[in-house]
Amino acid sequence: MSITATTALPRNRARRLPEQVLRLGIVVLLIVVITVLGCLVSDRFGTLNNFLNVYEQSTDLALVALGQTLTILTGGIDLSVGSMISLLSVLTSGIINSNGDLVLPVCAGIIVLGMVIGLINGIAIVMLRVHPLIVTLGTGAVLQGLALLYTMAPAGGVPDGFDFLAYGRIADISVGATIVLLVYLLASFLMRRTATGRNIYAIGDDRHAAVLLGLPVKRLTMLVYTLSGLLCAMTAIYLVARFGSGQPYAGANYTLASVTPVVVGGTMLSGGRGGVIGTLLGAYLIALLNDFLNFLHVSTEIQLVVQGLIIMLAVSAYREGKRG
Amino acid sequence: MRNGFKAALLGTLAAGFLAGVGHAQSQPATPAGYQGAPRTELFNPALTTCIRDTSKYKKAPPYTIGFSNAGLGDSWRVVALDELKQGAEDHKDVIKKLIITDAGHDDAKQVSDVQDLASQGVDLMIVSANTEKALDPIVTRVMRQGIPVIMLDRRISSDHFVTYINASDPMMGRLWAQWIVEKLHGKGNVVLLGGQAGSSPSENRMNPAKEIFAQYPGIHILDTVYSDWSPVKGKQVMQAVIAKYGHKIDAVWSAHGLQVPGSIEAFVEAGFKPGEIPMHTTADVNGPLLEAIKYKVPMLEISDPPSQYRTAIDVALKVLSGAAVPCTYTVNSQISVTPGDETPSIKSDVPFDSLGLPDKPSNYLVTNDLGPTYDPTTAHTQYPH
C-alpha cells in the first residue's frame, strides 16, 4: 500500500504540470489585459512610476496571502489572520511608542508572538480535530477582542525612519515589496525542492493517504499555521511602517482579502493543488486592478463588483481548463 | 518693520480670502443663524494667525484636482460629496477634471488611492483622511513631491498640509461639554458616544471635551463607546451602556447627530419615559431634532455643515492662484439648544424648533445648502470628470 501511494504522488504531479502552467497563464493574461486597457484609458497608467507604485501597493496583501496559501494547500484555512494583524500592529506601535531603542527587540518579540499564536492555532486544529475554519474563526474573535481591550484607537507610534520598510526605495524600487518577492522565491523553492514542501502538498491532496504513508501530518499542520502567524506578524510590522501607528482594526479587511490572491492565483480551496508564485501574481493582479479602477474613476461599489467578477472569471476559467 | 509689513499684507490677503469664499449660491434647508466671520478666528486668543504662503503652487488653469475620500457610508458624507461636486461644477471654467477616489474607510486603500492620484498628475489634492495617523506618512510624502494637499473635515496628525478645512472640531467638543457641565451644575454622570475610533472628527471633539469635564471633579465619565457614526451601532452600544448604568446616566455627549437616533431609541426601548431621557448633544441630523421635541430630551445642536466640502473647492482655487490662505479654515457652526435649556455659556443662534423638518427622513441633514429640493437619495450632481 505504501509503495502504491508513493509512486502515485509523482504521477499526479506530472499530470498537474499543464494545470499549473494554465493557472499562471490565466493570471498573467489578466495582468496583461488590464495593463493594455489601462494604457488605453490614460497615458499615465503605463508609466514606470505607476507600475512601481502598484508593486509597492501589493506588499501587505502578498505577505499575508503567502501564509494563507500554505494553510489552504493543506486543505485548511486561517480566518484569524485579520485579527492577528490588528492585535500585533497595535502591540508593535503601542510598545515601541516612538522609542528607537525598542524597535528591534519589539519587532523580534512580535514575530515570535505571531509564531506562537499560529502554533496555538495549529495545536488546536490537531488536538481538537476541529476544522481549521472553526478553530481560526474562534481564535480570530479572541484576538480581535484582545486588540480592542489593548486600545480602542490608534496606539503609540514609531520613530522616524521606520517607514523606510513601507515607503523606502532603492533605485526607485520598493524595498518592502522586493523583500516580499525574495520571500516568495524562497518559499517557492522550499515548496518544490524539499520533502517538507512536497509533504504539505500531499496532506492537502489526500490527508488520509498522507497519514497512511507515515507523513508527519500533525507536525506539518502545526508548521503551516506557525508560518501563517509569522507572516501575519511581518504584515503587522509592515502596516505599522506604512501607517505610522498600529490600529485596532488594521487587519480587518485581510481575513477574506488574503484568500482572493490565493484563489485567483490558482490554488484550490480543497488543498493539494496550487502554488505560491500563483498567489504572488494574484496579489500583483489585485493591486493592478485597484490602480486601474482608480484611473477609470469608478466608485468603490463598482470596484467591488469588478473585483468579484475577476475572481469568478479566473476561477471558472481554471475549472474549464481542468475539465478540458 | 519689514516683517510687520509682510504680516499686515498677509493679514489683508487672508481677510480677503475669508470674505471671498462665501457661498453666494448656497440655500440652507433651515433658517440661517450666525452669518459673521468664523467665531474661532475672531475668538482666537493667539496674537497672530498662521497664514500659509502658497505662491510656489501657483499654476495657470485649467486644473485637475484629486479628492481622496475616506469613504461614504453615512448620510453626512453622501451630502458632503455632493457639495464638493457642486463646487467643482460651479468652477468648471477653470477645473478640467475632478478625480474622486473612495477608500471605503480602509486605511490601506486610502494610502494607495493617494499614491494613485499623485500618479495621475493632479495639480492639487484634497484629502479627507480615514484615520489621522495612518494617512500622515503618505500625505507628508505627497507634499514633499510638490503637490499641495488640502485636508478636508478629517486631518492628519502632523501639519504637513497647506490648510485644513473643518467646522472646528475642538470648539464643538468643548461647547457640548461645557453645556453638559452647566446643565448638571458641575455634578453628574456622562457617557461619551464617539464616532469612528481614531478618526480626527471623533478624537478632536472628544479629547477637548474630556479636558473640559476634567476641570469639574463632580463630573464622572461612566463609559466611552464608539458608534462608527451609525445609528444602528449607536443603538447597540448604548443598549449595553443603559443595561449597565440605567438611570445613573445624566448626559450623553455625542460627537455628532448621526448616532443619536440610535441612542434615543435605546433609551425609549429601555423604558425611559418622555422627560426621563438624559440630555444629548447632536449635530446636523434631522431625527434627533424631532425626537428631542417628541421625547422632551434636552439637546444642544452644533452644526458641522457639509458645505465645507464646497468651500474646499474655493480654497483649492485660491491655493492654485498662489494666494495666501490660513493654515486652518473653519466654517461657521450654528448653535441651537432646546427651549429652556440655554446656559450662561450656550445661547441659541437659531430657534431649536425651527430646525427639524417633519417631512424629511431621520437621517436628512438639515444643514445642507444644496437647496430645499435636494434629496441625497436621488441627486446626481454633475461635475467635471
Image (cartoon, coloured by chain):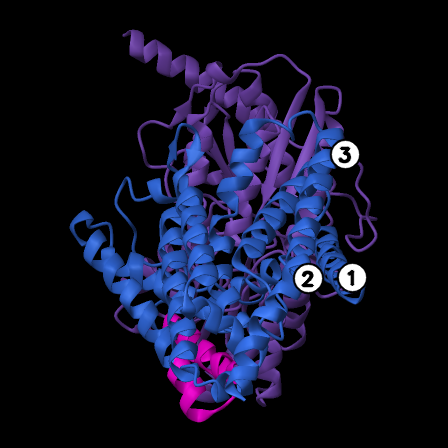
Q: Amino acid at mark 3?
A: Tyr
**Where does label 1 land, which residue?**
B360
Q: Quadrant of the C terminus of chain A?
A: bottom right
Place of residue A121 in the rendered image (x, y in percent of width and height, measured from the top left): 41, 80
Which badge, 2 or 3, comes first in the chain's sequence? 2
Place of residue B210 in the rendered image (x, y in percent of width and height, measured from the top left): 34, 61
Q: Write down the chain letter for disc 1.
A: B
Is B92 left, or right, of A161 in this rendering? right
Q: Disc 1 vs disc 2: Cβ atoms closer than 8 Å?
A: yes
Secondary-structure class at tag 2: helix
Q: Amino acid at mark 1?
A: Lys
**Where does label 3 land, which residue?**
B383
Nearer-the-camera pick, B89 or A283:
A283
Tell whether position B115 is magenta.
no
Q: Residue at x 62, y 50 (%)?
A: A286
Place of residue B175 in the rendered image (x, y in percent of width and height, measured from the top left): 44, 55
Q: Residue at x 51, y 60 (%)?
A: A65
**Where does label 2 land, which residue?**
B286
Which mark is on residue A297? none
Of badges 2 and 3, nearer the viewer stands 3
